[in-house]
Image: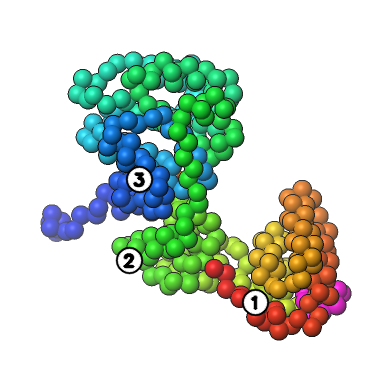
């Protein structure tokens, strides 16, 4: 039997896209945080005086999104013709860059008075020689094009290039804005999520919206429900409940008992030492130790954290952690109630 599907609801072309792409803001108004940067850029555009730009800052904070949204705003339907985007996955030898820039910026677009825009994404991956050569390219094509260099680490960009651009730092996104954005997306996508689960995502993403959206999507795909438990299970980080038990054991027992019980816990729950150290650090800074003791403990934890990346013996580093916690125990004798007062929430 033939079935006529012509009346069926058509899937939207964006339905298959991952959330990061589906929710990449297309215009400047949908970009969260960075109010000052957005205002400055809007002023540049309205006065038609766009300088060369250098966007820098951690991953997932909207650098690429912002320049693309700005280009759309500036050029409207001519966006495609007026913008050249090159990134690190392309061949970044200076000859290729020079040739591409030359063939793109070497001709004027007779439909527009505006300069063209050349986006050099992930610029910090360019070798120094290429960056030196780029100085000249930027100058040669200044009458016809504006450059926007984008990178994570601005100190990897040579000073001569930096000084040719207006620098803008994209800081990690504000946690509240990330939370609100996640809630909005959940409502749109009919994702079942409670606020506590979303707060955990916000705290682990450290202001990286790409990471937040990717975690949200994985948790939802894996569990069809986003809450504290499903988030921790998916990201493989220790649950705060387990860290509390771990710390309570360590801060209330002798070295031998602590070592035996905490090691068993670590093995049974398959916790990684690096994650335990991070979580313990997170708790210890919130305990009201005398300042000198606190400084010593934090310093030792920082060293341990560094050593775990360099030393193959997890057991050795684990014993180091036990040692630090014993010191904390001796400092907390008589401070039990302090420990109970510590806010054990993650966010
Ligand atoms: N400020 C923001 N407002 C709204 N969404 C954002 C913002 N920043 C990032 N995102 C989301 O994160 C995704 C990645 O952003 P984008 O590619 O702009 O990051 P980036 O700063 O260029 O990162 P990288 O340094 O890794 O290239 C976007 O698709 C978007 O969904
Ligand atoms: Mg980018």
Report, in whole angstroms, how far the alpha carbon at label 3 lies from the one at label 1.
41 Å
First in sequence: mark 3 or mark 1?
3
Question: Residue at left 83%, top 71%?
Answer: 326
- Label 3 lies in ligand 1 vicinity (Cβ under 8 Å): no
Magenta region, main secondary structure: helix
Say which quadrant the C terminus sits in: bottom right
Question: Residue at left 32%, top 46%?
Answer: 28
> Is 313 on the left or on the right of 81, as rendered?
right
* Mark 3 lies on residue: 39
Circles 3 and 1: CB atoms closer than 8 Å: no
Q: Position of residue 87 (x, y in %)?
A: 46, 32
Mark 2, Cα crowd under 10 Å, few <14 / some 14-19 / many 20+, is few
119 or 3, which lies in front?
Answer: 119
244 or 162, which lies in front?
Answer: 162
> Is 327 on the left or on the right of 25, as rendered?
right
Residue bounds of the magenta highlight: 250-259
Q: In the rendered structure, does residue 179 fall within the stretch colored magenta?
A: no
Secondary structure at badge 1 equals loop
Say which quadrant the N terminus sits in: bottom left
First in sequence: mark 2 or mark 3?
3
Report, in whole angstroms, how far the alpha carbon at label 1 lies from the one at label 2.
33 Å
* Mark 1 lies on residue: 342
23 or 128, which lies in front?
Answer: 128
- Label 1 lies in ligand 1 vicinity (Cβ under 8 Å): no
Can you tell which of label 3 and label 1 is closer to the viewer?
Answer: 3
Asked if 79 appears above or below 235 in the picture, the reply is above
Circles 2 and 3: CB atoms closer than 8 Å: no
Residue 266 appearing in the image: yes
* Mark 2 lies on residue: 187
């Amino acid at each position: 039997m033939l079935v006529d599907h012509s009346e069926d609801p058509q899937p939207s072309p964006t339905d298959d896209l991952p959330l990061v792409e589906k929710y990449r803001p297309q215009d400047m108004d949908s970009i969260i945080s960075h109010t000052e940067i957005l205002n400055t850029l809007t002023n540049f555009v309205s006065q038609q005086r766009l300088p060369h730009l250098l966007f820098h800052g951690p991953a997932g904070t909207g650098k690429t999104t912002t320049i693309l949204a700005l280009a759309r705003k500036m050029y409207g339907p001519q966006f495609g013709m007026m913008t050249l985007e090159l990134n690190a996955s392309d061949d970044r030898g200076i000859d290729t860059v020079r040739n591409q820039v030359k063939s793109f910026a070497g001709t004027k677009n007779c439909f527009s008075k505006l300069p063209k825009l050349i986006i050099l994404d992930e610029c910090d991956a360019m070798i120094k020689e290429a960056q030196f050569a780029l100085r000249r390219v930027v100058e040669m094509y200044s009458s016809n094009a504006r450059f926007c260099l984008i990178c994570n680490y601005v100190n990897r960009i040579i000073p001569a290039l930096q000084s040719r651009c207006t620098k803008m730092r994209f800081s990690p996104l504000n946690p509240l804005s990330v939370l609100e954005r996640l809630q909005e997306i959940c409502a749109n996508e009919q994702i079942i999520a409670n606020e506590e689960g979303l707060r955990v995502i916000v705290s682990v993403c450290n202001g990286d919206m790409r990471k937040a959206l990717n975690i949200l999507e994985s948790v939802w795909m894996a569990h069809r429900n986003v809450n504290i438990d499903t988030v921790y299970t998916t990201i493989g980080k220790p649950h705060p409940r387990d860290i509390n038990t771990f710390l309570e054991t360590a801060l209330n027992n002798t070295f031998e008992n602590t070592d035996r019980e905490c090691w068993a816990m670590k093995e049974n729950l398959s916790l990684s030492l690096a994650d335990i150290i991070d979580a313990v650090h997170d708790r210890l800074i919130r305990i009201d130790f005398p300042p000198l003791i606190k400084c010593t403990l934090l310093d030792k934890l920082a060293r341990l954290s560094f050593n775990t990346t360099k030393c193959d013996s997890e057991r050795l580093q684990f014993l180091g952690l036990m040692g630090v916690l014993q010191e904390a125990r001796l400092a907390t004798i008589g401070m039990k109630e302090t420990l109970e007062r510590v806010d054990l929430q993650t966010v």
